[in-house]
Every structure is written in structure tokens, then in C-alpha cells.
């Protein structure tokens, strides 16, 4: 397989944009990416779109050629990937594999979601469709309820505290406040996080990611051609996508996501590194407990130690393992289909030294972890400087 590099990146601001539609968001991110990679739409060999529920949110189907044509990309494969919250992470994985296999040279990957055009109850209904409709959802479970159960069980098994969950929220809000692309640029205190409006015990509104609009894009090329497009290529050192069962009831232990563990192991093996060598990470904190579980599943800490590790400040930008310097899904926002590629964009910016006020001191090897549903899909990517 050929070594592969990211040679272009672009994204929109995340937020609530009543005057923007799905296509305009995707086109903005895609054009920024093509400009960053110094290529024309006619040079793109394939277009991959990550999108979870565009048809449900906006009514538009056949989204890949719809968006591709708006970008000026026609006459090539245009394919939409759906894997719940890991939709664009999956699109990125398959783009990397296709370039590594020599099928294409230049693949543009765009992730996009337009969510705020629907009412909150309808958004919850659409998001729930990524779960087990015949069982958990039929019984009334939403994703906040499912992750609340994960949090309660983690507390029971390992002594994780509400203060540990709040520490995740406080850190990510502080990081997001410095991110010009973030949906919520608001610093909060531990006291505010603990006193947040209840959503599903023990989770409050401060533990839950945002309903957002937004898009992100990356351009993939063989490493041997990377210098044609950028002076700062970022190598895909390791990547893996894995899957698991949808219902929590079918998992032996709901405090861990086997798909994340397997994807991480495969990505580490491909890159020839261990978790201790990862300098920083963007992880899927759809809920604060998800970040704590990710720390453990990715091998950054032992099982049950994710909470104290966070509360001790180890995942702060100045800590030994900075996590979600962008603000994460919690503060940056979570336009579901855009999240996976947005994580890649954030890691790429760090490695290039282009993260501005968010720039970390150590940034040569970064990790992105994208989760679909309650762990049924996982994509883990390791990126390093060329």
C-alpha cells in the first residue's frame, strides 16, 4: 500500500445558521480545502461525502453528486457514507484506503450536517435512529439516556465522580473559547457544570454536545505526490475502522467500547507506535463520559482512571496528554456528519503549526477518534508530520 498524506484542509465555523443550507456549508468547506491544496475541482479523482441524516434533516437525498456538482466536481465517483456520528470519519477511512491501494490519487472528503432547521424533539428523534429502534429506542431511550447509563455504571465500577465529568466540560469550554470556529465560545466553572440543567441523570446540559450546523473537508493524495500540493503534508501514519453491536444490552460491559479498542490497536500497529507516543488527541466527546471512556479505550490510561486523569489536569493543553484542544464536540459543536473530518482538520492544523491560540507545544504525532452511535462504529486515525 502507498503511503498517504493529507494535502489540504478547510472547514466552516460551527454554529446555528438559519440562513445557510447544507449545500452552501459543504461547498464553503470544500472550496477552502481545494484552495489550501492548490488544486482545481477538475483534478479530483473521487468525491466522498460524510453525512448522517441530510435527507431527514433537510429532505434532500442523493447528496454526494448534489454537493459534488455544486463544487464543480462531476464525471467521477461521488459517494455518500453514513455511519451515524462517524459518517465522515468512515468517509475519510475509505478515501485513505482507496488512495493507498492506488485506485485514486486525489480524493476530496467533505463532512457536513445541517441540524438546526428542525425542532429539538425532531432532532432527538432523528439522532435516535442511529440506535436500536426495535429495542432501546422503542422503550424510550435517547442517546443522552444511553450515555447516562454508561456514566452511572462507570461511577459504580470505578468510583468516577460527577466532578470528573464536570472537569471534561470545563476544560473543553476553556479550549473552545479560544477557537474562532467553535459553536460555543464560553468559559464555565466546575460549579456551573455541576449545577447545569438535568438532562438524564447524572448528565446535565453541560455534559452534552451541541446541536450544530457545519462542514469540514480534507484532500487526500499519495505521499509521493504531496509536494505538488503543499509544503506541509501530514502523513496518515495509521488508521482503522471497526464495528460492534448497536444495543447497549448486547454488550458485556457498557463502560468500554470494544470497537474503539480494536480500531486503536490496529491503528497503533499500522503506525508502529504505542499510545504513550501520541502527543495529543481529538476524541469524540459527544457526552463528557465519552471522553473519559475514550482515554481508557485508547490506552492513554488504565481502565477506570480516565476520571481522575482528567481532574488532575493531565488532558489540559499544558498537560502531558492534551485532549480536545479544539474544544471538542462539547464546545466546538457536533454537526454529526462533519465531526470526523473536522477532527482531522484540527489535528492537521496542530501538526502544521497553524492552530493559532490553540497551538500545542508538542504536536508532531496526533490522534483522532470518531465514534458512531453508542459504539457501533469507531474510526481511529494517527497523523504525523511528513
Image (cartoon, grey):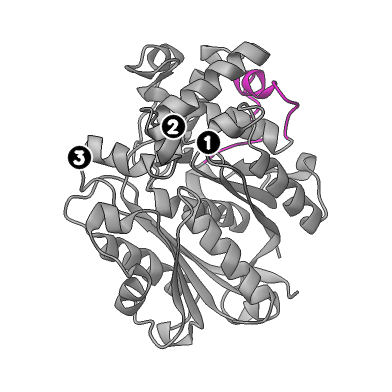
Q: Is residue 334 above or below residue 7?
A: above
Earlier-in-chain disc, 3 versus 2 = 3
Which numbered marker is on residue 119? 3
Q: Is residue 377 left or right of residue 383?
A: left
Within-10-Å neighbours for mark 2: few <14, some 14–19, many 20+: some
Give the labeled residue for mark 2: 136
Asked if the magenta segment contains residue 35, the reply would be no
Measuring from the top left, give residue 114's x and y in whole percent.
29, 53
Looking at the rendered structure, the secondary structure element under dot 1 is loop
Taking depth in this image into account, of 109 and 140 the one nearest to the observer is 140
Label disc, if present, on residue 247 of the rendered structure: 1
Residue ID at (62%, 32%): 251
Residue 180 as seen in the image, left or right of residue 221: left
Which percent across, then down, holds residue 242?
A: 64, 51
Q: Is residue 111 visible?
A: yes
Q: Are marks 2 and 1 in contact (CB under 8 Å)?
A: yes
Q: Looking at the picture, how far across and down is residue 356, in whole percent?
A: 49, 49
The magenta region covers 300-325
Q: Is residue 169 visible?
A: no
- Write down the quadrant of residue 200 in the picture: top left
251 in relation to 180, above or below: above
Q: Residues within 10 Å of mark 3 (few under 14, many from 20)?
A: few
Q: CA gap, disc 2 to disc 1? A: 7 Å
Where the C terminus falls, by quadrant? Answer: bottom right
Q: Residue furthest left?
A: 19
Q: Residue at x 59, y 37 (%)?
A: 323
Q: Please check the rendered image and state whether residue 310 is part of the magenta-colored stretch, yes or no.
A: yes
Amino acid at each position: 500500500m502507498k503511503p498517504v498524506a493529507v494535502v489540504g484542509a478547510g472547514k466552516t465555523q460551527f454554529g446555528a445558521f438559519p440562513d445557510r443550507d447544507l449545500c452552501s456549508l459543504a461547498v464553503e468547506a470544500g472550496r477552502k480545502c481545494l484552495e489550501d491544496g492548490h488544486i482545481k475541482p477538475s483534478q479530483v479523482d473521487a468525491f466522498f461525502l460524510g453525512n448522517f441524516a441530510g435527507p431527514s434533516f433537510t429532505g434532500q437525498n442523493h447528496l454526494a453528486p448534489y454537493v459534488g456538482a455544486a463544487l464543480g466536481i462531476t464525471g467521477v465517483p461521488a459517494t455518500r457514507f453514513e455511519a451515524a456520528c462517524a459518517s465522515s470519519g468512515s468517509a475519510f477511512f475509505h478515501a485513505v484506503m482507496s488512495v493507498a491501494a492506488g485506485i485514486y490519487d486525489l480524493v476530496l472528503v467533505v463532512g457536513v450536517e445541517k441540524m438546526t432547521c428542525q425542532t429539538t424533539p425532531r432532532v432527538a428523534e432523528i439522532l435516535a435512529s442511529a440506535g436500536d429502534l426495535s429495542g432501546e429506542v422503542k422503550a424510550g431511550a435517547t442517546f443522552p439516556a444511553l450515555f447516562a447509563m454508561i456514566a452511572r455504571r462507570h461511577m459504580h465500577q470505578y468510583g468516577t465522580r460527577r466532578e470528573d465529568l464536570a472537569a471534561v466540560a470545563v476544560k473543553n469550554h476553556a479550549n473552545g473559547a479560544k477557537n474562532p470556529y467553535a459553536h460555543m465560545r464560553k468559559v464555565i466553572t466546575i460549579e456551573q457544570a455541576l449545577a447545569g440543567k438535568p438532562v438524564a441523570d447524572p448528565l446535565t446540559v453541560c455534559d452534552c454536545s451541541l446541536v450544530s450546523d457545519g462542514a469540514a473537508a480534507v484532500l487526500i493524495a499519495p505521499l509521493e505526490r504531496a509536494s505538488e500540493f503543499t509544503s506541509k503534508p501530514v502523513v496518515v501514519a495509521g488508521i482503522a475502522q471497526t464495528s460492534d453491536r448497536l444495543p447497549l444490552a448486547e454488550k458485556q460491559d457498557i463502560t468500554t467500547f470494544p470497537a474503539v479498542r480494536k480500531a486503536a490497536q490496529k491503528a497503533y500497529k499500522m503506525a508502529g507506535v504505542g499510545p504513550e507516543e501520541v502527543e495529543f488527541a481529538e476524541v469524540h466527546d459527544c457526552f463528557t463520559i465519552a471522553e473519559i471512556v475514550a482515554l481508557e479505550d485508547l490506552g492513554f490510561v488504565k481502565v477506570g482512571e480516565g476520571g481522575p486523569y482528567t481532574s488532575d489536569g493531565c488532558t489540559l493543553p499544558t498537560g502531558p496528554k492534551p485532549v480536545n484542544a479544539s474544544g471538542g464536540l462539547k464546545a466546538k459543536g457536533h454537526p454529526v456528519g462533519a465531526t470526523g473530518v473536522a477532527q482531522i482538520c484540527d489535528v492537521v492544523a496542530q501538526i502544521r503549526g497553524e492552530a493559532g491560540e490553540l497551538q500545542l507545544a508538542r504536536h508532531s504525532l496526533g490522534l483522532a477518534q470518531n465514534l458512531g452511535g453508542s459504539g457501533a462504529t469507531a474510526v481511529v486515525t494517527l497523523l504525523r508530520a511528513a
